[in-house]
Amino acid sequence: MSRVALAVALAGATLGCTDYRELVRPGPEAESILVRDVCLFPATGPECFEHVDVLVRGAKIESIRPTGAEPPPGAFVVSGRGRTLLPGLVDVHVHLLASSAPPWRWALPDPEHNLQAYLYAGVTTVCDLGGPIGDLADLREEVESGEIPGPRIFYAGPMLTAPGGHPTGVVEETVPWPVSSLVLSRIAREIETPEEGARAVDEVADGGAGVVKVALDDLPPGAPKLDLDLLRAIVERARARGLPVAAHVRKAPDAVAAARAGVGLLAHGVLGGPLGEDEARILGSLRIRVAPTLASVEGYVALFEGEWKPNALDREIEDPGILADLTTGTDLATREVGPGFTAFLYEMSDHRATWASSVGRLHEAGAVLLAGTDSPLLGAIPGASLHREIRALGECGIPPAEVLLGATSRAASFLDRQGRFGTIEPGRIADLLLVEGNPLVDLSATARIVLVVKEGRIVERFVPEGRLEAAK
């Protein structure tokens, strides 16, 4: 058992812990894997290539050829007919030490389950945007050593915020005291001076972070926001340490301010109000990356209005008790979730009709849309939420190829400057997702998973009815 999982289990002995089933385990090692006669979306551009053979040897992709060659001796051969092969998915906004349970159900987070869930859903890389840096470093080490199965992990460590700024209010209203105080001390750092900002950046950089996370949002409504001079000082220090900066924002003016300050990624985008053409033009001209997290915010609003329903992948991954609590009497408007969080839910519900046009306007202006989910959080099921996000981006009018690029190579390039993964090309790490159908025609095909490969090794996936065989 991993160190983080052991800590959760010990706490669960007193407080009670959800009993998750096994979702994945590493499959048998094969010298080579051949995916034969497949439609290939390599994520090097918007094109898909029919009737292709992809050969994996060891941890890397060895060759891509027109179909027809004999497989190497002993190769594990997978039929690709009627299927599409794309790179393993990348979720640029997760919280590995969180839970998708509602606040009225006391369910301890299970990071080992979360990691399995992402891999089960074909997500081979994640970036945790706000969590305890020591635990995240341990989780990454345990995944890399093979102690626990999971996706490749990047992380930011604690979020840098204004005194009393987000996430303080949300945590205090949704997590019981004194647990809320402990949580905040591990996931956020309050910054008052440029010197404090520089020290905080150094702290996360020295702790192995691959990105710095800041908050620039009055959440709950009226909460303090990070001073822009402090934000610029944080960005400058992060650049000196070779790290990009991601900013939690909700509203267009904050998004523009963050982009002008040099932030590389807007988490949540501009869903807290309409996005004007001039604001979109500025964001597009800066080629800012935006992860709208539509699926999670839509989930909040659906819960608020008593309309949240699980889909098939949600049911395969999440604990039935948590799903029951999310779908039975889930009208958040009548729940005790705190006045600030309730005001946030009313505000987001009011602006729901503007989301599609705002995201579409960002794309048209030249902003780079990435896939992120903010999962697992209230109603956002780890792994499954990325497929909801992919479909939600498509419903905003984003072309399917652009959505898939944002969930693969473009997301990977934000996290990894070495270009090791995120595309299907000879010499790249073999993170692969094989699905039934063609997501360039129907984005929901990404959830019809046949095979997941991480670093050249097949992932055994266990659906509720038993084992899903990879080769057919």
Image (spheres, grey):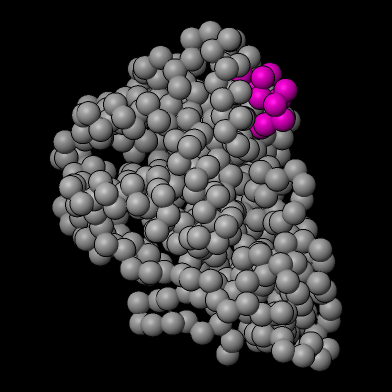
In this picture, residue 389 sits left or right of residue 218: right
Query: Does 92 appear above or below 39?
Result: above
Query: Which image quarter holds the N terminus?
Result: bottom left
Give the x, y percent position of residue 280: 63, 31
Between residues 349 and 146, which one lies in front from this camera angle?
A: 146
In this picture, residue 4 sits left or right of residue 200: left
Q: Is residue 80 magenta?
A: no
Q: Is residue 239 magenta?
A: yes
Give the x, y percent position of residue 186: 40, 30
Residue, x 57% and y 57% (percent of image)? 145
Provide the residue span drawn in magenta: 234-245
Residue, x 77% and y 61% (percent of image)? 428
Residue, x 37% and y 17% (percent of image)? 164
Residue, x 55% and y 76% (percent of image)? 27
Query: Which image quarter holds the C terminus?
Result: bottom right
Is residue 294 visible in the rendered image? The answer is: no
In this picture, residue 378 sits left or right of residue 422: left
User: Looking at the rendering, which quadrant does residue 40 occupy?
Assistant: bottom right
Query: Does 335 appear above or below 320?
Result: above
Query: Does 39 appear above or below 380?
Result: below
Query: Does 453 appear above or below 307?
Result: below
Is residue 183 visible in the rendered image? The answer is: yes
Give the number of marks: 0
In this picture, residue 96 sits left or right of residue 105: right
Between residues 198 and 340, which one lies in front from this camera angle?
A: 198
Between residues 124 and 345, which one lies in front from this camera angle?
A: 124
Give the x, y percent position of residue 132: 44, 35
